[in-house]
């Protein structure tokens, strides 16, 4: 079951202005195979919510269940196993590993999951083909355009077939047409693989294409968007 | 954990951050190369002290009372370059006006010239020759007797009987009071005393172990007692041990200071790549794998740089060892450099192995803090902090 269940999650950070509440008592549920858009302005807590769902951040309070796993209880080793097997993350700026080529970036999640040799190479080639970049395998990230970086980041996030795909404003730095295509690819892939998609975005147009949407304001959940 | 994956990733890190890698590598390279040379020079200095001390007269291995059945030809074996059999007796020298106790030594002048350097220390006159009634004595003894080259000196036995009359052919000066003030030499062919000890001085090949040769020779018939130079010159042995300890302390101090610089550079290097470690953690890389990646980077860089530094340092040592470094101006009044002040740096497992090993140890120590930082922080903390 690839359900995401967030129950009363709160998270705050220390900053120069004292403690800042990034999330306050947020609860939500995304059914297996569903696609949720998280809307909100910058600083509303979208990224923190995705980080809590993906285990990149431990909530101060509340519980997070992803694909049957109580993420908030996992120790470092179990959390790493959960992330490498079950989660794919597309960051706002792509966050490709700058010291690896595109091909090596795509191969890494496969290798972390024990997929090696010809099978790994075959899957990498198929991924490059799927995102329409068959010729950039040997390029370093700095040699790619913004759109290409996000497509490679998407390919890397789905390389190992995760149950949950988390995308943090993946279209923020893209023109609208490229962004639309990328969101379309994500939705298509999630539907085709029965994966659950959560995408944080500023873009209200995304709402029309997902199964559900929420809006965050100052770390609190407003009523469904 | 698949070690090959992390080693490959570490190699990519280093390769594609080549400027940082180069700067860091140069620091380790320079420190290692310099210390290989300096420690080889220390070994060479110790060698020179041994060479000077044993080459003057005593040999690397000596026997103070050689049994009658043992001949010079018996003193052979692995590592032995040659041996000199001498005769020694305590006697008195008497000049026209004075007298002095002496250790009289009968030698084969030609053989002595092949193995020892005392004849090179002649301050007046000449060294001994074949069968003549020549006497070759130290400067301190000559002063005590008020005897000069060409003058006649009598040798008197312990029972006050006259053993013979000899002519001073030469006077030596080593700068070592024990030699200059108490030794006199005559040719064996003109040896005056029937009742004398036979002694042996054994000279070794480079690299031969004196203690092992002494032990082997002590198994000859009659069970002669052979001593290695470290036994009959404990002061030199201590001085050499002190040199090694001093050099070891210098190496540790140099690397401790250099490692501070290396540690700072490593921290900057890893901080520069901190975002990558955050991304890796977000992809599910375990803390132990993050640590392995950083340690593989540090180890790979240190081994490559220290290996190259050691190779270049060794090359310089081999080059300099062909001619040696003449430090005569600094050693001319030092009894441990009585023959020559030329130092030939020499590579040993100590001089070649310790500097790279220290580089690796301090490099790994320098990596402890960055490793702890990356391992303890969560992926989101790292990514948010950039």
Image: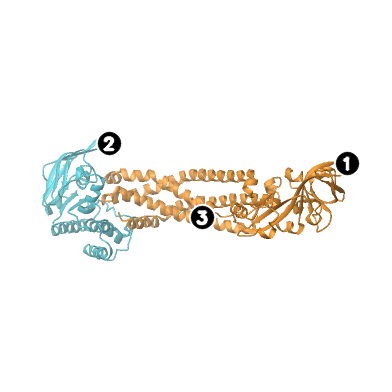
Letter of the orange chain? B
Please give the chain letter of the residue carrying mark 1.
B
Residue receiving disc 2: A14
Please give the chain letter of the residue carrying mark 2.
A
Q: Residue furthest right?
A: B96
Please determine whether, in this image, residue A26 is positioned above or below residue A198. Answer: above
Where residue A36 is drawn, which disc sits there? Answer: none
Residue receiving disc 3: B310
Residue B224: x %, y % from top left: 65, 51
Residue B363: x %, y % from top left: 43, 48
Residue B339 visible? The answer is no
Tag in front: 3 or 2:
3
Residue A219 visible? The answer is yes
On whether disc 2 and disc 1 are found on a single subunit, the reply is no
Letter of the cyan chain? A
**Residue drawn at 58 percent across, 45 percent down:** B241
CA distance separating discs 3 and 2: 49 Å
């Amino acid at each position: 079951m690839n359900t995401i269940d967030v129950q009363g999650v709160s998270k705050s950070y220390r900053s120069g202005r004292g403690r800042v509440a990034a999330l306050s008592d947020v609860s939500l549920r995304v059914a297996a195979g569903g696609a949720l858009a998280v809307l909100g302005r910058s600083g509303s807590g979208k990224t923190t919510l995705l980080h809590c769902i993906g285990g990149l951040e431990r909530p101060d309070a509340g519980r997070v269940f992803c694909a049957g796993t109580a993420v908030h209880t996992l120790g470092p080793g179990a959390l790493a196993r959960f992330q490498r097997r079950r989660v794919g993350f597309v960051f706002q700026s792509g966050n490709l590993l700058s010291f690896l080529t595109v091909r090596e970036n795509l191969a890494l999640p496969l290798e972390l999951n024990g997929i090696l040799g010809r099978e790994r190479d075959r899957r990498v080639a198929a991924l490059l083909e799927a995102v329409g970049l068959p010729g950039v395998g040997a390029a370093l990230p700095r040699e790619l355009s913004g759109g290409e970086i996000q497509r490679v980041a998407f390919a890397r996030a789905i390389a190992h077939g995760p149950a949950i795909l988390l995308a943090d404003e993946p279209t923020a730095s893209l023109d609208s047409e490229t962004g639309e295509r990328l969101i379309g690819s994500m939705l298509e892939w999630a539907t085709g693989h029965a994966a659950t998609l959560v995408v944080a975005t500023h873009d209200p147009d995304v709402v029309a294409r997902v199964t559900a949407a929420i809006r965050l304001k100052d770390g609190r959940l407003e009523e469904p968007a | 954990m698949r070690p090959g994956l992390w080693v490959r990733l570490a190699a990519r890190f280093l390769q594609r951050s080549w400027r940082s890698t180069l700067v860091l590598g140069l620091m380790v390279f320079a420190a290692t190369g310099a210390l290989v040379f300096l420690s080889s020079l220390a070994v060479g200095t110790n060698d020179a002290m041994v060479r000077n001390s044993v080459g003057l007269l005593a040999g690397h291995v000596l026997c103070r009372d050689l049994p009658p059945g043992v001949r010079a030809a018996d003193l052979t074996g692995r590592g032995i370059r040659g041996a000199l059999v001498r005769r020694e007796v305590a006697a008195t020298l008497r000049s026209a006006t004075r007298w002095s106790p002496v250790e009289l030594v009968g030698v084969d002048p030609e053989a002595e010239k092949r193995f020892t350097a005392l004849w090179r220390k002649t301050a007046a006159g000449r060294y001994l020759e074949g069968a003549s009634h020549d006497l070759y004595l130290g400067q301190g003894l000559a002063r005590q007797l008020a005897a000069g080259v060409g003058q006649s000196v009598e040798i008197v036995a312990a029972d006050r009987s006259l053993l013979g009359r000899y002519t001073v052919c030469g006077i030596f000066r080593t700068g070592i009071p024990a030699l200059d003030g108490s030794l006199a030499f005559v040719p064996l062919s003109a040896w005056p005393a029937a009742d004398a000890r036979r002694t042996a001085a054994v000279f070794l090949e480079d690299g031969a172990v004196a203690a092992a040769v002494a032990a082997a020779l002590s198994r000859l018939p009659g069970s002669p007692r052979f001593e290695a130079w470290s036994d009959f010159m404990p002061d030199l042995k201590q001085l050499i041990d002190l040199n090694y300890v001093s050099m070891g302390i210098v190496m540790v101090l140099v690397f401790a200071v250099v490692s501070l610089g290396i540690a700072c550079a490593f921290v900057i290097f890893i901080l520069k790549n901190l975002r990558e470690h955050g991304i890796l953690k977000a992809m599910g890389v375990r803390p132990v794998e993050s640590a392995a990646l950083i340690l593989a980077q540090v180890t790979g860089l240190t081994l490559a740089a220290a290996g190259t530094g050691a190779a270049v340092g060794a090359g310089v040592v081999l080059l300099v060892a062909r001619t040696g470094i003449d430090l005569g101006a600094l050693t001319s009044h030092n009894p441990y450099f009585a023959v020559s002040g030329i130092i030939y740096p020499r590579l040993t497992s100590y001089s070649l192995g310790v500097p790279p090993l220290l580089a690796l140890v301090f490099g790994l120590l320098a990596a402890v803090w960055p490793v702890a930082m990356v391992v303890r922080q969560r992926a989101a903390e790292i990514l948010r902090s950039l």
